[in-house]
Image: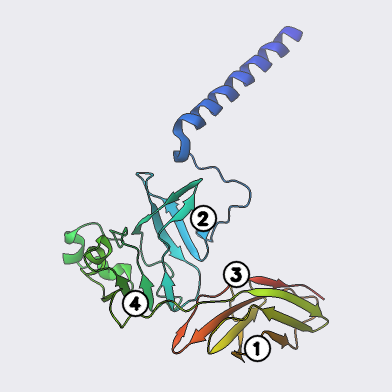
């Protein structure tokens, strides 16, 4: 009996060693779902409001989906993925951008595909099924991004006067809940006004919105339901442009 037990231990130890060796050899091709990694409803890693995945060549990032509600989205030049800082190279499709109200997308120069793969897709009308309806792209002249969007999308150059810089946003500093009231405080920045939205859903479905003047740094929300958790975000407005929404903060139950 003891001999069989020793054999079993050696067998499982050998299997474990093989698995660890394979993981080291494959490296980033075997992504580990580490603690603290957030994933979106589609199962992709969530970087802010953007769902991303590793490109098949493992040297860049693919934009898979969008879960925010900003009118203007600036795609970062680098994303941190599996311990590396990687540039975005393609959009898989318009998954969430148009339907969530995005009107402008600023692209880094490294983006070279917008969800269609060659000119035949454009000629066959396949691109129309992908979307990007009502979205204007902003690109640098002569970049890969310009080549990617100009075949079938409206675009403007980043160095012209029609493209104002993104509006600076703010963040919520604190939320305090007292019965059916909640006090929200935020960091003051230069803007024309603040817009706050709150909801019982973390995705801000059916959110209520409140506007505050540029000199305000706090807001009292009334008539909250008893024993219900709420979520809140804030953004700024300058002229006709809005900033991106801040990170979601929780209003605790009472």
Q: Is residue 213 above or below residue 74?
A: below
Q: CA distance from mark 2 to mark 1?
A: 38 Å
Of labels 1 and 3, the one closer to you: 1
Q: Residue at x 52, y 59 (%)?
A: 46
Residue 207 position in % (x across, y down): 60, 81
Q: Report the disc number at residue 216.
A: 1
Within 10 Å of disc 3 (Cα), the crowding (few <14, some 14-19, many 20+) is: some
Within 10 Å of disc 1 (Cα), the crowding (few <14, some 14-19, many 20+) is: few
Q: Which residue is mark 2?
A: 43
Name the element at disc 4: loop
Q: Residue at x 40, y 77 (%)?
A: 165
- Comes first in the chain, label 4 or label 2: 2
Name the element at disc 2: loop
- Comes first in the chain, label 2 or label 3: 2
Q: CA distance from mark 2 to mark 3?
A: 20 Å
Of labels 4 and 2, the one closer to you: 4
Q: Do the residues under discs 4 and 1 have CB atoms within 8 angstroms?
A: no
Q: CA distance from mark 1 to mark 3?
A: 19 Å
Q: CA distance from mark 4 to mark 1?
A: 32 Å
Position of the C terminus by quadrant: bottom right
Residue 243 position in % (x across, y down): 49, 78
Q: Do the residues under discs 2 and 3 have CB atoms within 8 angstroms?
A: no
- Comes first in the chain, label 1 or label 3: 1
Q: Residue at x 62, y 17 (%)?
A: 11
Q: CA distance from mark 4 to mark 2?
A: 25 Å
Name the element at disc 3: loop
Q: Which residue is mark 4?
A: 135
Position of the N terminus by quadrant: top right
- Comes first in the chain, label 3 or label 4: 4
- Give whichever of 163, 183 is nearer the camera: 163
Q: Which residue is mark 3?
A: 247
- Comes first in the chain, label 2 or label 1: 2
């Amino acid at each position: 009996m003891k001999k069989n037990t020793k054999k079993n231990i050696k067998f499982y130890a050998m299997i474990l060693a093989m698995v660890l060796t394979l993981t080291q050899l494959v490296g980033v091709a075997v992504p580990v779902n580490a603690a603290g990694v957030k994933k979106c409803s589609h199962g992709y890693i969530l970087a802010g409001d953007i769902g991303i995945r590793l490109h098949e060549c493992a040297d860049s990032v693919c934009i898979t989906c969008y879960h925010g509600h900003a009118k203007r989205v600036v795609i970062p030049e680098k994303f941190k993925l599996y311990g590396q800082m990687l540039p975005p190279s393609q959009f898989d499709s318009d998954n969430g951008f148009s339907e969530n109200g995005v009107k402008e997308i600023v692209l880094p120069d490294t983006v070279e595909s917008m969800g269609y793969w060659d000119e035949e897709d454009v000629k066959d009308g396949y691109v129309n099924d992908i979307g990007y309806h009502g979205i204007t792209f902003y690109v640098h002249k002569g970049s890969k991004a310009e080549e990617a969007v100009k075949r079938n999308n409206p675009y403007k150059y980043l160095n012209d006067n029609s493209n104002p810089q993104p509006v600076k946003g703010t963040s919520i500093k604190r939320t305090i809940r007292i019965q059916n009231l909640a006090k929200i405080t935020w960091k003051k920045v230069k803007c024309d006004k603040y817009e706050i939205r709150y909801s019982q859903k973390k995705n801000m479905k059916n959110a209520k919105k409140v506007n505050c003047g540029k000199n305000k740094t706090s807001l009292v929300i009334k008539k909250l339901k008893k024993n219900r958790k709420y979520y809140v975000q804030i953004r700024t407005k300058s002229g006709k442009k809005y900033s991106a929404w801040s990170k979601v903060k929780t209003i605790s139950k009472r």
